[in-house]
Amino acid sequence: MDHRRSSRRRSAARATAALGAATLAVSAAVVGTAPASAAPPQEDKVPTAVGYGGAISTVDPEASRVGLEVLRKGGNAVDAAVAAAAALGVTEPYSAGVGGGGFFVHYDAQTGTVETIDGRETAPADMPRDAFVDPATGEPYPFMPELVTSGVSVGTPGTPATWEVALERWGTHSLKQALKPATQLARRGFVVDQTFHDQTADNAERFAAFPATAELFLPGGDAPQVGSRFRNPDLADTYALLAKHGTDAFYGGDLAAEMVDAVQDPVTDPGTDLPVPPGYLAADDLAGYEALVQPATHSDYRGFDVYGMAPSSSGGSTVGEALNILETFDLASMSDPDYLHHYLEASALAFADRGAYLGDAAFVDVPLDTLLSDDFAAERACLLDPAAAAPKPVAPGDVNASSGVCGETIPATDADTENVSTTNLTVVDGEGDVVEYTLTIEQTGGSGMVVPGRGFLLNNELTDFSTVWEPDDPNRIEPGKRPRSSMAPTIVLRDDEPVLALGSPGGSTIITTVLQTLTNHLDRGMPIGDALAAPRATQRNTADVTAEPEFIDAYGPALEAYGHSLVASGDQFTSAAEIGAATAVQIGDDGLLTAVSEPRRRGGGAAMVVDPVER
């Protein structure tokens, strides 16, 4: 579906809401001019909010407030989600922005349908299959820094097209209305918190390599100080451009030409020691980009209908397959170690199949129906030993021999290189519409390349392709292809009514974060806030289980008795030893909304409701 030609499908009620919201203004909380030294109020980052009339949860209080005001002024969940996402482009520029992409899942209360938008970045038409191979050695580039900080890593951005498609298909606001709060936020600025400071400092060497990036994010040569005010007038001007001319101004014209120049001829600081290979993004790649509306994946889990993203995401299929495997076991009656052992083993089995079969369905014949079938799940579940962890990696199942009994496997695949950043938001409006949206520029700081004078970072999503080209690899590099993603925005229904929406950042740990939160809540009976906050571990079909320190402290010895090897989380890109930074909204039978976010991960999130009630 061409994002410039997508049809408007609004009900009379939504048209009325659009008229009432036409004069949308940003609240004083958003446009206020607090002194630069003022710290954000403590109540800004409240991890749980309960009430009626609509709810939103993001990692950032500014973004949550923007979305909440849209809901209060009569906008629907889609209007609020796009406005909040644009605000996250201001306050979370290292995780999201117009230079990236994402996946958007929408539940329409009037039709009872769940649909999705694939706004994933695409590989340029001229990208060769050996783009990640060093011509000097004939070997793959090391993952850092040649692939990450480069023009080679930049895919065609999909975020602006996603916003336009979502608003035209389901929204009541124009793109101009939706961008107004974030435009004002970018001009007046926000107060720098510890997370923003630390993420900047972690990327200082990369950012310093590009004069345009250093000028914006390293004022005076250092990361912005906690408590200072960070403004981005260039991004405000970019948003104003899109508000006036639509996404044609992004996918064509001067801005498109400037993105191409930044990728094909990166301007670097003469003093940098980082090699920055040029990339392949061209004007035709931008002009031809489409955000795709497509059906959601679906799994029936213990009477719940779980909807997620289909390929190019592997999130919906891998979460769904793991749930189908776990459905064959009585998780509710197990001890904590028993339950966690089954969760980890089911994750490994599903990840094995992810690696073997998942890729962009426009280029790869993905056996989605088989992967999400109960027969295939039974075939895989019979390999799960309740008493012992299997040696890793486990082999993928053979979808061509699937019969519902213990069957054939095929050779295991290599681990992927997907990164750990990204951001997520959850919105429910007063009419019952739901949006779950995960958006990203890949790793924290993306490619490190700011488009000069435009105020946003370009993604490095193409590093999600397999580094070495193999003809049977579903995630091999191909021109125009979307790299495989683990983003897993998820909406859960019961009796055709939404009861829960959730998602998370975290690269390939997104899948396990969503899976662990779902099983914590649906099987173990944890309140959704506790289910989301619980210590996390992730098994992605690797020799070791990566786990947060609190998880190891609580369950390490017990799980080691099953044969699991646990290692503490953390990565080479950030100083955080955390897995994910999830958001969720639970919808009660009486319409009571419980919005939850992280109490501490990534500095804590901000959950808000339109009409709060006493807890």
Image (cartoon, helix red, strand yellow):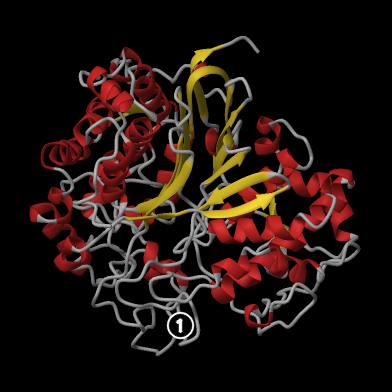
Q: Which residue is mark 1?
A: 468
Q: Is residue 557 visible?
A: no
Quadrant (top left/top right/bottom left/bottom right) for the C terminus: top right
Q: Tell me residue 391's x, y (percent).
A: 79, 74
Q: Is residue 366 visible?
A: yes
Q: Residue at x 86, y 65 (%)?
A: 563
Relative to 591, is 101 above or below? Answer: below
Q: Amino acid at mark 1?
A: Val
Relative to 462, is 105 above or below? Answer: above
User: Which residue occupies the foreground of this view, 575 or 319?
Assistant: 319
Q: Residue at x 89, y 44 (%)?
A: 333
How many other residues sit within 10 Å of disc 1, few (<14), some (14-19) or many (≥20)?
some
**Seen in the image, is 174 located left or right of residue 483?**
left
Q: Residue at x 55, y 49 (%)?
A: 307
Q: Tell me residue 612's x, y (percent).
A: 53, 13
Q: Tell me residue 251's x, y (percent).
A: 17, 55
Q: Which quadrant of the view contains residue 413? A: bottom right
Mark 1, secondary structure of its residue: loop
